[in-house]
Amino acid sequence: MCKQTYTGRLLRGVLAALLLICGLAVPAVAQTPRERLNIDKDWRFAYGHADEAQRDFGYGLRPFFFAKAGYGDGPANPDFSDVSWRKVDLPHDWAVELPFDQRGNTNHGSKAIGHPFPENSVGWYRKTLTIPASDKGRRISLEFDGVYRNSVVWINGHYLGTEPSGYSGFRYDITDYVNFGGENLIAVRADATVEEGWYYEGAGIYRHVWLTKTDPLHVAQWGTFVRSTIEGANARLDIDLTVQNAFKSEQGFTIRHEVVDARGQVVAQTTQADRSVNAVSDGVFAATLTLSEAHLWSLEDPYLYTLRTSLLRDGQVVDRYDTRFGVRTVTFDPDKGFFLNGKAVKLQGTNNHQDHAGVGVALPDGLQTWRLKQLKSFGVNAYRASHHPPTPELLDEADRLGMLVIDEHRMMGTSPEITHQLERLIRRDRNHPSVILWSVGNEEWALEWKDIGTHLALEMQDFVRRLDPTRRTTVATSGSGKGTSVGADVIGFNYGAQHDVDGFHAQHPEKPAIMTEEGSTLTTRGIYFDDSARVHLNAYDRQGRPGSSLSIEEGWTRVMARPWMSGMFVWTGFDYRGETTPFGWPAISSQFGMVDTTGVLKDTAYYLKSVWTDQPMVHILPHWNWAGRKGQPIDVRVYSNGDAVELFLNGKSLGRQAMPRYSHLRWRVPYAPGTLTARAYQKGRQIAVQSVSTTAAPAAVVARPDKTALKADGSDISVVWVQVTDKKGRPVPTADNRIDFEVSGPIRLIGMGNGDPGSHEVDRPAERHRYVSLSNWRSLAIDDLTDTSRAVAETADTTNWRDPAQWLPPEAQPPLTKGLVLRGEFARPVISAGEQAVLFVGQLAPDQHLYVNGQAVTAQAMDGAWVIRLDASQLKDRNSLSYVMPTPAAGVQALYDQSVGGSRWGSLRVTTPAAPWQRRLFNGWAQVIVQSTGERGRGQLRLVSSGLTAATVDFQAE
């Protein structure tokens, strides 16, 4: 019923700086009790390799790599140089940047990732953090909200752990490894070779990363649980608090709980003195508060309170932890359905995966908000997180917007790994008022008809109940009568056509029920005749899989005929990458959604709006641009929540019809260019009108941003709809013009799409780097630094030169000479037209000289590194890089020891430039997402299409 947030403020203010400048004494500033810092910015990223260690930056090849502590290898070595890597901000999904490929898994959107693509399936991330010396004595933790997948994390060369799941958040206490007062290197390796689901899942650090600093005595991660019981106009709050003591001695303290309302006023509080926790232990403490005149959380009024918990030692606050929560009651009744705060509510839900056009699974927080609002626009009041734990920010927005959530675990089972993932989910999310039901499984085919399915369902539900006795659990099943369905607490039916729901209800009258999936209708936005060659399917509501699923209308009608059915979750809300039923390649996305991958409403969404909302509406399908079909009958359908609709063609009435309950109206209209108008009535009074008109040729580009004022935080976004209009300003519903996007000022583009399930256009253009390691390093001792032409020549024979990687005992080290030639080799890389090759070199000595193939070259500064730009036409089959420099005082062996296997001496990078930002409209629509860069000022988006009037959108970032 609540959500944890953390308080943390900057310690150094402008006043302190002024006092220092003036030479005045500055009193010591008390350390903030708890800091939780977002560290999404300024990471380095590079592709590794799933099969070949050498192409994975030599990861795992170092002697004693996993045998000894602190022997992180390749990019996990703190001395490894990543200056040639791409700079990225998180969240980041590298899979969305990859091309489509027929060899890719169609269930995952045919992206070039997985077993056939080892060069694309491993990604490395590195970031350097400076942690001040003043933090010594605090506990320092890294928290990852989600990394897809099989992530390995290192800090300063020390292995922290592996998290196999791409959906479970995880945390590492790094205190013992921190270099206080200096730099600290985080390295993360993610391997997306093996899939976890059967839909697009992305790849990389696609959720937020946090650095948390606390006193050794602190509230544990997800360490509060607030349960509310309504007692008349008041609410009793039962609070469980887990306190961790990392000190090596028992600690005494006082607990203070304060309830703060939405206005910031303290409305209830309690203090518990003389509490203690043993050394290096956890303690659990219970408290009870009465909240007078409690303001309930509801769909219409999602009111939130905050529990502010403080730990005080010797009168000083050592930790402060905020927990957002709501007061409400949730009931699943086996005879009457679902109740919120004692009021019957039909769950009008959609299932949703977490990807979005253009950005993949790396959704900015603002896009989570936008997507939920888009669902609410056609009456959705419930969201099923299919089939994995959602990102925390989605639940934050569900709390704020008033959206109910089924929170789903990834996999059924009771192994320690699976159980630990389930525990993390429950502890993280059990304070969200939006969460009404835990789901512990979905369509587990190996379990659904077996006794083990019943057993595992019961075991998992008992485990959940121990962690959260306030909510019930469900298992979503594709078959019922045995196995998991019998064990389910609340039975989740996936597709009514696959179940005898009435028979099951009669046999198990004690079990509440819900349609966890219904529909699976297959529709392409704006298409009204099937076109299998283009993987397009008509948008009329019908059974997607006759015999196995129902139409949206049939499904909802059946739910409303059964008062005991709690509601229905349509499969799906948004179209998503992958699961390309009924097509394989070249389709790349599903077509189940009520909206397409960009969020444009399909016609079926308007049906739901007509039965799920009271806002007067009427909707006509199809459009009215049917060149070449004059006189041919067109299947015209109308959705409305009026009780009657009259249809007009060019002002002539085609008749008024009464609207059947939970249904639609239909006319067969011979096509004639002009305007088709539907007028909806309620008790004889017109309540809504809509027209569709035959348009002329496209004349102008039109852009409609959802907002133009952006926060200058480097994260805030604006979702921009793109259409073209004819000379009368009417949107052209069949347009497919290509739009080019350009930005200037403190904004950037982060993704684009158009909802076409067969489009192979680039989602998110990004430059791609390939790396060629220099090898066969040899060194030559010289006494004359002025005559090195033979040593650096392209034809120099290095057979008898020293191998600097060969270890020699101290007594066998040769005497130092005045100078040294260090030479490495690289093969001619494949460089296509438009690509650039750059040789990254090290600063090994202040007065070094560099040669490529015997020719003197000068390194140039680029992005904090030293590089040599190569001319592809001048490269040979075999090429050399030579350093000429004074011999280091510690000799060649020390030079090699600092080189991370020679990687700091030289690395060749070939860069494929990013594709242009351009997208074709699909049936009149496209979308581009604009994000602030973090700088203040005015930015502009320009949209250009050949032969059309361009559009511009001005943004202000503050």
Image (cartoon, rainbow, N blue to C red):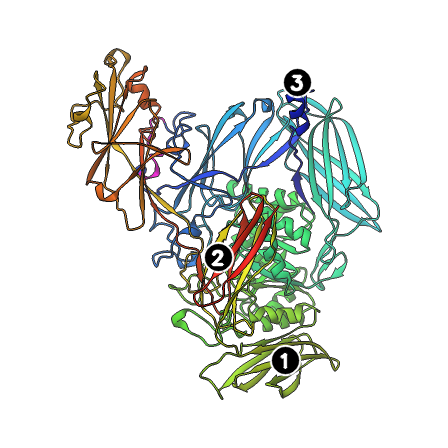
Residue where numbered disc 1 is placed? 678
Residue in front for this viewpoint, 548 or 18: 18
SS at mark 1 in the image: strand
Q: Residues within 10 Å of mark 3 (few under 14, many from 20)?
A: few
Helix, strand or loop: magenta stretch: loop
Alpha carbon distance from label 2 to label 3: 54 Å
Residue numbers of the magenta segment:
55-64
Query: Disc 2 marks which amino acid?
Result: Met
Residue 79 shows in this picture: yes
* Residue 243 in the image, given as x and y percentages of width and height: 67, 31
* First-in-chain label (2 vs 3): 3
Do tag 2 and tag 1 residues touch (Cβ < 8 Å)? no
Q: Residues within 10 Å of mark 2 (few under 14, many from 20)?
A: many
The residue at the point 25 percent across, 15 percent down is 818
Residue at the disc numbered 3: 23
Q: Is residue 945 above or below residue 668?
A: above
Residue 528, horizontal then vertical, whole percent: 49, 76
- Calculate the distance from the C-alpha at mark 2 to the C-alpha at mark 1: 33 Å
In the displayed structure image, the side of residue 807 where residue 134 appears, left or right: right
Left of 131 or right of it: where is 845? left
| In this view, 498 is above or below 132 | below
Q: Dot 3 lies on which element?
A: loop
* Left or right: 498 as drawn, with respect to 406: left
Q: Is residue 447 left or right of residue 310?
A: left
The amino acid on which the numbered mark 1 sits, given as a three-letter code, is Ala
Question: Would residue 59 be counted in the magenta stretch?
Answer: yes
Give the residue pinned by disc 2: 752
Q: Is residue 911 above or below residue 847?
A: below
